[in-house]
Amino acid sequence: MCVGRACLHRSAKTLSTGDLLTRIPDAPMVSVVMAVRNGQAYLRDAMDSILSQTLADFELIVVDDGSTDRTPDILEDYARRDCRVRVLSQAPQGLSEALNRAISAARGKYIARMDADDVALRERLARQVAFMETHPDVGLLGTAVCEVDPDGRPRAVFTMPGNDEQLRRALIKFNPFFHSSVMIRRSVLEQVGLYSEEMRWAEDYDLWMRLARHTRLANLQEVLLKRRTEYGGSHSVRHEREQVRHALAIRWRAIRMGMYPITALPYLIRPVLMLVLPASLRRSLRSWQRRRGRIVRT
């Protein structure tokens, strides 16, 4: 099934019914969306892992967000060799803007996220589609992941809370989804809109919280993604502060809108306390929080 490569020259923050639900007859089951900037080191691994999926009914939409390395050449090569690959290019704008452009161009029933330095296991799309097809009330589905170092060596396996009740309890405390593992039901995005372009350091957490108002949530307990992680803390203090500020705003909005009782207010205090802690202690607490509520195997 060949897919056209026409670029869509807009980045919508919200989607209309026409934008989201109009599908041509041969539209794929899944649209895999990826944003990349200067990702030449691992991009081929990521794309190969998608193109070798056991479920073949998909399109892979990659937005090149202003790369200055060999990323454009790599993308052009893949698009030339496999008509399921669609490449959109833009000046540097950021992750939210790039993903919104990819989703706006997507035609699939389901939207699957993928990062340009991760590796999807061959059954990933098939397993997620099978679950979504048999659970029509679920609109957001993640998976367990194996975290690997930059060289691909396994570090640990993380399994998030699995069912809707567990995930709702967790969502006010921390982000219980691995962003690059999720699959979203396209029709639900019509109700909530796209990634916020204001919540740059918590765009995924913000979207999950908005989705939770309209659909049920789930995480597969099976490892279906290798997530590449560089430890040691590469974010600046300013970025950490922005991330905490955005998390605070997201949680306060959820309480204010009645998603959680007033007794959940202590979960707003935690992000504020994080701002005044030394960086080394913040990293230790963040590592502990990443493991809280998860089954961890090292």
Image (spheres, rainbow, N blue to C red):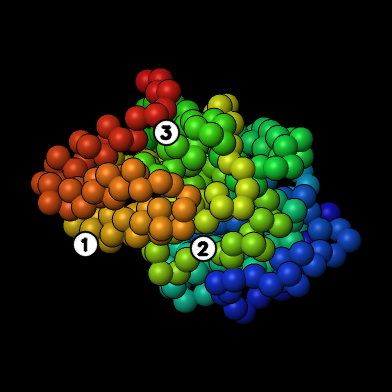
Residue at image mark 3: 147
Residue visible at 19% across and 43% down in the picture = 282
Q: CA distance from mark 2 to mark 1?
A: 21 Å
Disc 3 residue crowd, few under 14, some 14–19, many 20+, Cα 10 Å: many
Estimate the spatial distance between the alpha carbons at disc 3 and disc 2, rounded to whole Å.
25 Å
Dot 2 amino acid type: Tyr
Q: Most extreme residue toward the top, as rendered?
A: 297
Q: Would you name the residue on which mark 2 appears? A: 195
Earlier sequence position, callout 2 versus callout 1 = 2
Considering the numbered disc 3 on the image, is that residue within a helix, a strand or a loop?
Answer: strand
One can see residue 47 in this view: no
Which quadrant: the N terminus?
bottom right
Task: From the viewer's side, name the closer residue of 64 and 173.
Answer: 173
Which of the two discs, 2 and 1, sits closer to the camera? 2
Where is 186 relative to 139, above or below?
below
Left or right, 56 with reference to 115: right
SS for dot 2: loop
Q: Position of residue 247 (x, y in %)?
A: 34, 54
Residue 230 visible within the image: yes
Tag 1 and tag 3, C-beta contact below 8 Å:
no
Residue 283 relative to residue 39: left or right: left
Residue 125: percent from the left, percent from the top?
68, 40
* Residue reaching furthest to the right: 25
Q: Amino acid at mark 3?
A: Glu
Q: Residue, x 53% and y 34% (percent of image)?
A: 165
Percent coordinates x, y for residue 98 in the rendering: 52, 67
Quarter of the image for the C terminus: give it. top left
**Looking at this view, is 125 or 254 the one in front?**
254
**Which residue position is annotated with label 1?**
238
